[in-house]
Amino acid sequence: MTAPLRLGLVGCGTYGMQMQRVFAAQQRMGRVHLVALAEPDAARRARAQTGFDGAVFADAARMMADCPMDAVLIATPDHLHAPVIDMALHHGLHVLTQKPLGTDPALATRQVAAFAQAGLILYVDLHKRFDPAHIRLRHDIASGAFGRLLYGSVHMEDRIEVPSVWLADWVRQSSPAWFLGVNFFDLVTWVTGLEPARVFATGQTGVLAALGFAGVWDSVQVKVDYVGGMSMHYDLSWVLPAAFPSVVNQGIRLVGTAGLAEVDSQDRGYFSATAAAPGSVQANPFGMYDRLDPRFGPVPDGYLRQAMTGFLNVLEAHRAGIGLADLAGTYPDGASALTSVRLAAAVDQSLASGRPEPVLPPA
Ligand SMILES: NC(=O)c1ccc[n+]([C@@H]2O[C@H](COP(=O)([O-])OP(=O)(O)OC[C@H]3O[C@@H](n4cnc5c(N)ncnc54)[C@H](O)[C@@H]3O)[C@@H](O)[C@H]2O)c1
């Protein structure tokens, strides 16, 4: 039997704790060994340390230097993925990074090339590619069922606690386009195969500014023209009121010359109202649930978790002798994630200039 893959986790905030739980279950199943974690914040480090049997570091560089491992899992704030990716490259480690791949398209492009050169896997957690409804959408588009794609729309909107509480430490370095838009920027290119050519973005401020986050966009609208003529409209926002029945509201529709498709990713058919909590809840059980395994107990599952464990499928295939070139296209690799980074950067440029801006092709 091959030894479990040795993993180190970098960043133990909200999503890092999700990742720790997902990979702890994979450890019970004998697939991995979470050998170390790194988190600079003392309180979060202490929380992550509870019940954890690996080594604990304040500094990610120290962790990678001192602790032998095969790969790192990155859940730092968006603008801090790139330095950790560089550290992993320096230590010859495969990477699973949270989306976005980075916030600087030129740097991200160089990192993708460097990982390929080093024969290392650079995997981006772009979970929308794992939603069965989106897999079906991609299949139907490829079959020609909708004809030539003409236009469509996306909405992704978070409740206000996300920017104002969860991301309070780094919301000034982010925006609805980076934190939310990247998910669907990536998805649209993944399902259609079309590359963005030009963007025009507008936005609003005021709600978050009143809470002390001056200069942070409340909402952003993006019109994207794709190579070949398709046009998409994206409504991105993170100021939905606390009364909204789920943390995120989201969906996509695409219209072609021969048909259309719509995916409502928020209303997945599960609604509840209980005496214990005010208001009602519209949950998405397909994204996250615990599967009860007879041997391993509760195993976090659902497409959000499959986007993480998909990294292990790729690492195991690679260890079994399948080369990176043959694995390409089977997972959200760095090269395919670059489009979403270039598009989000072009949105920033358009918001700043007040004009349509080109989405620059890869350098
Ligand atoms: N895939 C998804 O659906 C999804 C959902 C939410 C968040 N995310 C992504 O996950 C990432 C983390 O988001 P979050 O909500 O957990 O943020 P967070 O602020 O809760 O956590 C980030 C953590 O990283 C730590 N950190 C900062 N610099 C570090 C460094 N150099 N080394 C180690 N740790 C460091 C911070 O102290 C903090 O604890 C972001 O990139 C975000 O976009 C993905």
Image: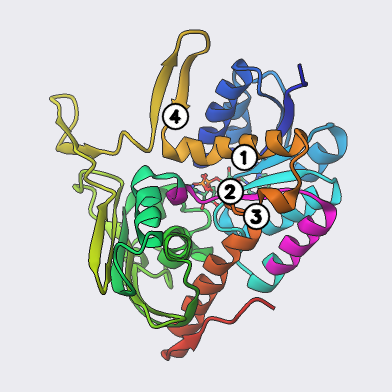
Task: For mark 4, give the secondary structure.
Answer: strand
Alpha carbons under labels 2 and 4: distance apart: 18 Å
List the residue tagged with mark 1.
311
Alpha carbons under labels 4 and 1: distance apart: 14 Å
List the residue tagged with mark 4.
301
Q: Which mark is residue 81?
A: 3
| Mark sitting earlier along the chain (4/1) | 4
| Mark sitting earlier along the chain (1/2) | 1
| Magenta-highlighted residues | 109-129
Q: Is residue 76 left or right of residue 68?
A: left
List the residue tagged with mark 2.
331
Residue at horizontal 58%, vertical 48%? 331
Residue 192 falls inside the magenta stretch: no
Mark 3 sits near ligand 1, with its Cβ under 8 Å away: yes
Q: Is residue 201 left or right of residue 329?
A: left
Q: Nearer the viewer, residue 36 or 212?
A: 36
| Mark sitting earlier along the chain (3/4) | 3
Residue at horizontal 64%, vertical 70%? 104
The type of residue carrying mark 2 is: Tyr
Say few, some or many: other residues with alpha carbon within 10 Å of mark 3 (under 14 / 14 to 19 / 20 or more): many
Residue at horizontal 83%, vertical 32%? 67
Nearer the camera: disc 1 or disc 3: 1
Residue 278: percent from the left, percent from the top?
A: 16, 34
